[in-house]
Image (tube, rainbow, N blue to C red):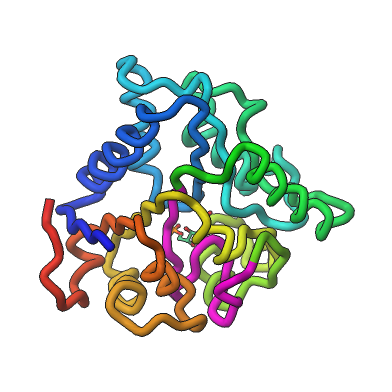
Amino acid sequence: MRVIIVKDTKQLGKVSAGLIAAEMKKKPAFVLGLATGTSPIPLYQELIRLNKSKALDFSTTITFNLDEYVGLAPTHDQSYRYFMNQQLFDYVNINKKNTHVPDGMAKDVEASCEKYEDMMDDVGGVDCQVLGIGSNGHIGFNEPGTSLASRTHMTGLTESTINDNARFFNRRQDVPTKAITMGIGTILDADRVVLVANGPRKADCVARAIEGPITATVPASALQLHPRVTFVVTADAATKLTLNWERA
Ligand code: F6R
């Protein structure tokens, strides 16, 4: 387990994008797992910069997003498909046909979750998964109590996550209460994982995920079982870590 403490979000972007770019260069048709939310935005900005300067090519990259709200169409400005277009896909030379986000409008949700797993299998699995972390320790929308072996599934969001996400919607009652998410087992199957976290609001969950016991009540703690996980954490989110971790 590698933990890199960085100064600020700019350095978080540089360090995490550097790790991912190095992996992407090793393999054509690289399969990149992606997250939404505010944490990976500096990472995506740096990936865009690398792509624009021709230092990183996305033409053969395949992506799978972690999650999507149930009931939001891809054109809804709070859907995760829309977010990915706005924050990354529209600005790099990726073929959008190679980008995948769970279908929040699926009629048969169970079948569409199974299909999502099959699509990842068909391309040989995720090479590198990007993650953020919720203030309650969730990864993807795997809320506390989710099985550590879970696969892609539909889930209800906790009050804490609905409150966290309410800032993006006009009214709290507009925040969807259900989502489709890769499971924790799905995430652990990725060859490599890079989790980014910033801000004092994340200090507790970061410490519990990295230095606490492995427990389903802190879904991110399952990452301690992953052989190639790197946490890139800003100093203000690392204040509750006690071990002598690497500083960038
Ligand atoms: C988003 C996702 C979530 C977020 C988490 C942190 O695709 O899977 O687990 O990573 O809620 O969100 P931010 O970065 O907005 O604090």
Q: Residue at x 23, y 43 (%)?
A: 15
Residue 101 lies, in percent from the top left, at 65, 44
Of residue 59 and residue 103, the one placed in the foreground of this image is: 59
Q: To which quarter of the image does residue 232 belong?
A: bottom left
The residue stretch that appears in magenta: 129-150
Residue 209 lies, in percent from the top left, at 36, 74
Q: To which quarter of the image does residue 69 belong?
A: bottom right
Of residue 78 and residue 16, the one placed in the foreground of this image is: 16
Q: To which quarter of the image does residue 134 belong?
A: bottom left
Please check the rendered image and state whether residue 140 is part of the magenta-colored stretch, yes or no: yes
Report the side of 68 relative to 234 (left or right).
right
On screen, 14 above or below 161? above
Please check the rendered image and state whether residue 18 is part of the magenta-colored stretch, yes or no: no
Report the side of 151 relative to 110 (left or right).
left
Residue 122 lies, in percent from the top left, at 67, 39
On screen, 201 above or below 30? below
On screen, 63 above or below 183? above
The prevailing secondary structure element of the residues shown in magenta is loop
Of residue 138 and residue 192, the one placed in the foreground of this image is: 192
Report the side of 21 relative to 217 (left or right).
left
Quarter placement of the N terminus: bottom left
Q: Residue at x 88, y 55 (%)?
A: 108
